[in-house]
């Protein structure tokens, strides 16, 4: 089985300050890893390494996934693009026909309850709405690897439950792998997830969701 992402003795430092040291992990199709730990221990850094946004200062990260969807804690949308255009961008970069990309993006935004906001630019959207646009953009490419950094920020309880079910259904049907940063156990929506508790520089403990 080809790994979606493989870390081998990975280290990472910001301005000579070590964030991660000698970290190894592997994520295969259909698996879910949830990252937890105090602020500043490197959870978001690990996610960015898995996405290929950052490069390790030691060791190596092998990314086997061809299609990756990323949702950051703070929505990163192009401010001069509409919600529809933001979701279309990764589809167009994959070579999809513009008409097909527009239809796919429209469908994804409708699933997110944003059918009436297709032409809205980010400054016209609430924080929770922008996060839903980010989720739509990440899922539109049918990712093999889904990377979520506190994806439910700004959601009310009902919307949070709806989005967790939507993501759980996607993972079940697609067999994609996922890495998720979750501050609260309530945000862990996959019962078979592997929980990795990060301490200073490395993993302190590793357990199954059913052991919590």
Image (cartoon, grey):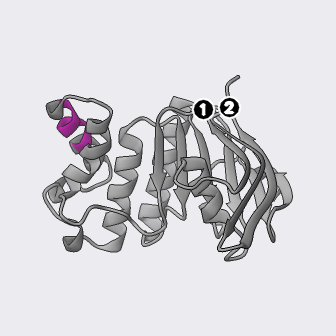
For mark 1, what is the residue? 64
Q: Is 41 rendered above or below residue 77?
A: below
- Magenta stretch, residue numbers: 100-105
For mark 2, what is the residue? 3
On residue 154, the disc is none
Whole-percent x, y for residue 101 in the image = 22, 36
Q: Is 96 rendered above or below residue 128?
A: above
**Of 158 and 169, the residue lying toward us:** 169
Q: Quadrant of the C terminus?
A: bottom right
Tell me, yes or no, if residue 188 can be seen here. no
- The residue at the point 17 percent across, 54 percent down is 118
The answer to which image quadrant residue 91 occupies is: top left
**Neighbourhood count class around disc 1 (C-alpha, 10 Å): few under 14, some 14–19, many 20 upward:** some
Q: How many marks?
A: 2
Whole-percent x, y for residue 135 in the image = 40, 53
**Of 17 and 83, the residue lying toward us:** 17
- The residue at the point 17 percent across, 59 percent down is 117
- The residue at the point 31 percent across, 65 percent down is 129
Tell me, yes or no, if residue 162 can be seen here. yes
- Answer whether labels 2 and 1 touch (C-beta < 8 Å): yes
């Amino acid at each position: 089985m080809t790994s979606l992402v493989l870390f081998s003795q990975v280290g990472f430092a910001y301005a000579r300050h070590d964030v991660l040291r000698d970290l190894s992990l592997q994520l295969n199709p259909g698996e879910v890893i949830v990252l937890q730990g105090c602020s500043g221990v490197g959870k978001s850094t690990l996610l960015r390494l898995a996405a290929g946004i950052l490069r390790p200062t030691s060791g190596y990260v092998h990314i086997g996934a061809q299609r990756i969807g990323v949702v950051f804690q703070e929505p990163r949308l192009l401010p001069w693009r509409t919600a529809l255009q933001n979701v279309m961008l990764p589809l167009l970069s994959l070579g999809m026909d513009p008409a097909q990309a527009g239809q796919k993006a429209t469908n994804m935004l409708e699933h997110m309850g944003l059918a009436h906001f297709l032409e809205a630019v980010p400054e016209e959207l609430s924080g929770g709405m922008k996060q839903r646009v980010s989720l739509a953009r990440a899922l539109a490419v049918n990712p093999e690897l889904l990377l979520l950094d506190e994806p439910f920020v700004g959601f009310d309880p009902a919307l949070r439950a709806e989005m967790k079910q939507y993501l759980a259904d996607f993972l079940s049907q697609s067999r994609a792998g996922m890495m998720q940063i979750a501050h609260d156990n309530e945000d862990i929506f996959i019962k078979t997830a592997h929980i990795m508790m990060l301490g200073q520089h490395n993993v302190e403990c590793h357990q199954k969701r059913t052991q919590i």
